[in-house]
């Protein structure tokens, strides 16, 4: 899922300076899980903006705003309220924000910052384990990704700076190379580490990414 954080409210107000009416769009998937754009956060945002003198012309939590056709359909259903607004505030990731922006003619404001593609460990604990490099190589590392989880993206073993199992770049985090070693030891694949891997093909993940499957 996409991990987001809500923008600072004062910054949002500055962004919407001079705008008196707002329609709010939330997200029923990732932003709901992150508590940045679900039903509760949309209601709270409506209240806070109303207190600051804005007129809320309406709001909707779209199941998954990154699904563009669904988003267009839901926005069409809300067209009367949207026609009355000067702008739409979207509490979702950048993908959802752009689905909305391309479906309407009024101004669209990002209410959240997109942080990373994250795994959910437990309630409100999110971890970045894949940075979508476009050329997955985890088979060489016991299924664990050093590209993302080692801050130096080291592919041929640890840097040697780890202190008591913690990463030298961030002592709050484990050195992922210890996890890779332990996992490969358990799966009896340590011999794979004897191979020297070339520099990663970082060009494999092209932006903007387009994949059309099944055509
Ligand atoms: S190697 Fe690339 S695709 Fe595979 S988990 Fe790591 S970042 Fe993601
Ligand atoms: S201590 Fe471990 S995780 Fe941190 S940069 Fe070095 S090899 Fe990577």
Image (cartoon, rainbow, N blue to C red):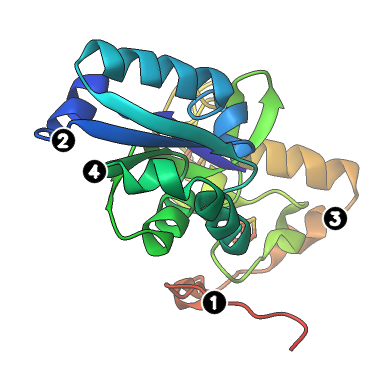
Which of the 4 quarters of the picture holds residue 52?
A: top left
Q: Position of residue 82 (x, y in %)?
A: 38, 45
Who is closer to the viewer here, 119 or 69? 69
> Which circle's residue, 4 or 3, is located before the other in the chain?
4
* Residue 210, disc: 1
| C-alpha separation, residue under disc 4 versus residue under disc 2 | 7 Å
Give me the residue at 72% from left, 80% from top: 213
| C-alpha separation, residue under disc 1 versus residue under disc 3 | 35 Å
Who is closer to the viewer here, 128 or 179? 128
Q: Are marks 4 and 3 in contact (CB under 8 Å)?
A: no
Q: Which residue is mark 3?
A: 189
Vertical relation: 71 (above or below) 59: below
Q: Secondary structure at mark 4?
A: loop
Task: Note whether ligand 1 is within 8 Å of mark 3.
Answer: no
Please tell me whether mark 4 or mark 3 is closer to you in this view.
4
- Pointer 3 local density, CA inside 10 Å: few below 14, some 14–19, many at least 20: some
Can the viewer see residue 150 in this picture? Answer: no
């Amino acid at each position: 899922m996409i991990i987001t954080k809500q923008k600072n409210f004062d910054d949002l107000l500055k962004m919407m300076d001079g705008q008196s009416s707002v329609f709010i769009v939330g997200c029923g998937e990732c932003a709901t899980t992150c508590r940045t754009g679900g039903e509760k956060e949309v209601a709270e945002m409506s209240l806070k903006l109303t207190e600051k003198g804005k007129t809320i012309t309406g709001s909707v939590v779209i199941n998954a705003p990154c699904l563009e056709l669904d988003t267009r359909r839901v926005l069409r259903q809300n067209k009367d309220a949207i026609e009355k607004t000067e702008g739409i505030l979207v509490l979702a990731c950048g993908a959802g924000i752009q689905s909305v922006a391309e479906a309407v003619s009024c101004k669209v404001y990002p209410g959240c910052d997109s942080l990373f593609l994250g795994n959910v460990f437990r309630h409100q604990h999110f971890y970045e384990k894949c940075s979508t490099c476009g050329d997955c190589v985890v088979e060489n590392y016991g299924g664990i990704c050093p590209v993302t989880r080692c801050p130096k993206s080291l592919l041929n073993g640890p840097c040697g700076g780890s202190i008591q199992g913690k990463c030298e770049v961030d002592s709050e985090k484990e050195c992922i190379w210890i996890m890779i070693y332990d996992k490969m030891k358990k799966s009896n694949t340590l011999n794979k580490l004897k191979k020297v891997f070339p520099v990663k093909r970082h060009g494999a993940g092209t932006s903007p990414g387009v994949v059309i499957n099944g055509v």
